Image (cartoon, rainbow, N blue to C red):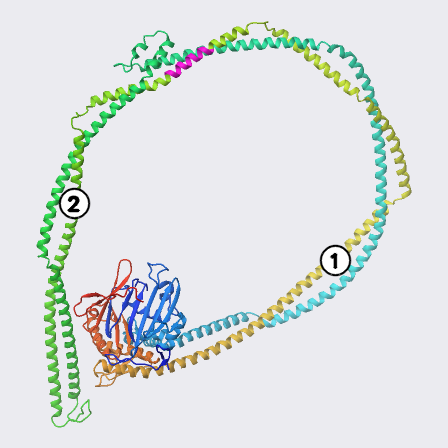
Amino acid sequence: MCGRVSGEGARVPEGRRGFAGGGSGLILERLYLQNYKQFREPTELLPPEGAVGIVGRNGSGKTTIFESILWTFFGSRGGGPRFANDAIPWGGGTVADKTIVDVTLNLGGASYRVSRTLHRGKTEAKVFVGEASEPYLSGSSEVAEWVQSQLLCMDRTAFEATFFARQKELEFFAGVTGVERQREIARILGIDQVEGAQKLLRADRKELRDQAAALENILAGVDHERLVQELREAREERDRLGSEAKALDEKVAAADRELSAARAEGEKLEAAYRRHNELSRELAAAEGARERAAERATELKARLAGLDEDEKTVGKLLPRTEELPRVAEEIRGLEEARRRHERREGAEKEAKRRRVQAHKAVAEATDLLENLDGDGDELLAGWSGVFSVEEDGERVRRAAGVLSAAAEAYEEAEAHLGALRERRSRFEELAAGEEELTEVKEGWEASKSHLASLQEAIEDLDRGGTLEERVEELRRKERRLERQSAQQKGLADADERDAEKLEKAARMISSSDEVAECPTCHRGFEEDEHAEVLETLRRDAEEYRARAEEARGECRRLAEEAKEILEELDEGEETRERVRSLREERTGADARRQTLEGNLARVTARVTIVREGLRGLAPVTEEALAEAALRVGRLKALRGAHPRVESLLGRHESALAEAAEFEEETARLGEGPAYDAARHEELRAKRAEIERLQGQIESLQNRLAARPEIEEKLEAAVTEEERTKEGAEAARGELSALGFDEDAYLANRERVVEREAAREELRRERDELRERARRVQSRVEALEGDLGRYEDGRKAADEKAAGAAKLGEMDKLFSEFYRELTARVRPNLEREASSLVRDLTDGRYEKIEFDQNYGVKLFDGLSDAYELSRFSGGEADIVSLSARVALSKMISAQGSDSLGFIVLDEVFGALDADRRRNVLLALDRLKKTFGQIFVISHVTDVQESALLDELWSVEEDDEGRSSVRRIDVSTGAPRVLLGEAAGRP
């Protein structure tokens, strides 16, 4: 048995908590969310007992509220991507924001609070019992295990199927095929794991069969007998080649012995051959050395004879070189005269060039002054007197003095021109400002008139501010009429069904004879009792029909009245929209008026300032501006010409001074002896000849200095010739004594080559034979490998086929086990569903039966069971609701305590208005079974149903954050549900 834990830590027996409906079980007492998905701000929910509606747009977080219970109890384990830790905090926050979810359940007055937090990726969980401030248990996995084994006594899948009825789950009993229906019930009950195991088992079996088939296909393409035959033949061939290789090894060994003997004899002959060659080289070297020594001696004797002739030549040339000092002295005097002559010619050229530069500078300055002299008044004092000077240099010098005052005159003229332009700009600014002032004033007057007209239109439409109250009043009337119309339609439908049942019973009795039995108690009719019963049934049926018609008439009247109110409401909405638009337009118009008013004040102030600044000043004419600009331009040209004139004057005076200096240097260099170019050339030729003779004498003297060395070398050459002659005679004698036989040497070499060729031929034959043997051995190994793989494949194919057969047997056992489980579930489900349908229909239907695929048959109390398709849509919905709730109760019964709350998530989406009302009426009666029923829906009739005890509105702002408001179902007025819960865990 699953137990509970008291505040002192002792186990207590299972508790029970009663509630208004008379049921028992765990009740959701409190739910606290903070930073859980879109619920960013702290949200505390204190659900009452009874039916609670949760409304809001799709995606606003209605289902998220109850999914947080699953995360708190079991964490992320087994929850899929929606419960992963990185999907839990609000997407607009950071990892530093802490997520907190608290769930408090009440059982028989004892509370159990489970808290789970997520901070920076780390999850913590705690369990608190009663009002204890210290946790009874801590740890994420420990709390999940305790919730499963102690608090709920069911795992995550069972708990979710127990308290959560998802979208469209009311339809699957009537709207899907039998196999799908059976699988859906198995999923809800948690026994679909058998099918999951079968899928894995069948996948393994298929894989083994496929592998066995693939192996059989491979083995079918192999000839086993041919492999055995080829292996036997290859082994025989390998043995034969081995014997032949041994015989060739013996032949190769014999050839090696013969080759070794021939090589030993060849080595002796090779030593004699090398000594013969060595002596021959020594003899040739000695003969060559003797010949070279004789040649050197002959050459040295000829050089000594030449030195005697050189000594005679030196004696003849020495007297011709004695005149060299006199000739050199005369040449130095002529070269000095030549240098003075060249410098005097250069100075004359430079003097002429400087005179030309001075003239060009003064001419350029004169042309510049002529260009600057224009018509009109004299701009600078003394300017006209410049052109009366005749001498060009003096005229330029005077002009430079006059132009030195141009810069100051230019600055004064430019300041005067700027003042004129500024005054004219201010007069233009004044004219533009006065024009802008007129336009702004006209716009301001127009905006005031438009604003007044808008205010008048708003007051006419708003009627003293009562428009909003009128629209809200019409909305309340329309909702009230809709609820009344729905109630009248429900009553009419009920009366119609009762009338049909009475008429059906009357037809059954009418079709029988006078002695028929009563279809209810099976008692026979007496005398006129048959007709009396028929009359009573018909009268009651007509009475029900009349009441139904009266209710429908009232429904039509209410619909007409609602239509008139809707038309009036549409008109009011249009008027309110028009007032809102006019108010927005008035706000814009008032903003424009204020803007124009500010602009008017700014423009008026600016115009006044400009007008005051121009008081007493006359406007500036174009002629005055042009004259001032012309004067500034001429003075600017004069100012710019002053540096140029000064530069040209400096160049002129500098060139004249340099020309005078060069003329003085020319006169000084003209003094001294004149230069004789012919005599200079004659003396240079004579000096060159004497220097050539001196070089020849020096060369001959150097050669004569080598006579002792040559005589020494001649003596050494004669000695070397004698020594090498003796060495050659000794080498000839040793060669004769050696007695080398070259023919025997060559014959031995041919014999060695023949023996080597014979041995290599034998080796080649042996290598070919070994290669054939190696290929045969490879063939043997390949055949042995193919045969081994065939035998391994045969064994593997047999093993996989046997494994697939065993898995097939297991699959059959699983199928029988699954059928046994579903067969055990059906009677319990029929019992629970029948009990619920009796309660929800006030005993109109007695019993529900399920076939093998959970198809529904319903007993109406008057005949045999019929399939669900024979009944009306509202009755089918009540039966589906009963079956789904029965499933939840069965799962809950697996624990020690049944859940006292259930969540119906968008189960009305596919139902029409009549069927939704029927299911809502059934839910009101379902409160006897569950203490709390949470209905999540976006359908209007569900949101406005009078059967709800409380309504929660889930709202989402522009940033994606959701909040919950509680709606007073009696008045429709919203009230903040959170209250002072912010910050409280």
Secondary element under disc 2, as helix, strand or loop, is: helix
Position of residue 857 measured from the top left corner of the image (x, y, whole percent): 27, 81
Tell me, yes or no, if residue 850 can be seen here: no
Residue position marked by numbered label 2 in the rendering: 594
User: Label 1 is placed on what type of residue?
Assistant: Arg
- Residue closest to the eye, 294 or 597: 597
| Image point (18%, 39%), residue name | 602
Quadrant showing the N terminus:
bottom left
Quadrant showing the C terminus:
bottom left
- In reply to whether residue 75 is colored magenta, the answer given is no
Q: Earlier in the sequence, mark 1 or mark 2?
A: 2
* Residue that extends furthest to the bottom in the rendered view of this protein: 527
Position of residue 748 measured from the top left corner of the image (x, y, whole percent): 83, 50
Q: Main secondary structure of the magenta part?
A: helix
Tell me, yes or no, if residue 11 can be seen here: yes
Position of residue 524 measured from the top left corner of the image (x, y, whole percent): 17, 94
User: Label 2 is placed on what type of residue?
Assistant: Gln
- Residue closest to the eye, 622 or 639: 639
| Image point (21%, 27%), residue name | 423
Which portion, as a residue range, is magenta? 645-658
The quarter of the picture where residue 446 lies is top left
Residue position marked by numbered label 1 in the rendering: 763
Viewer-side label of 1, 2: 2
Left or right: 669 in relation to 567: right
Left or right: 505 in relation to 258: left
Q: Is residue 861 above or below residue 248?
A: below
Q: Is residue 556 above or below residue 752?
A: below
| Image point (40%, 77%), residue name | 194
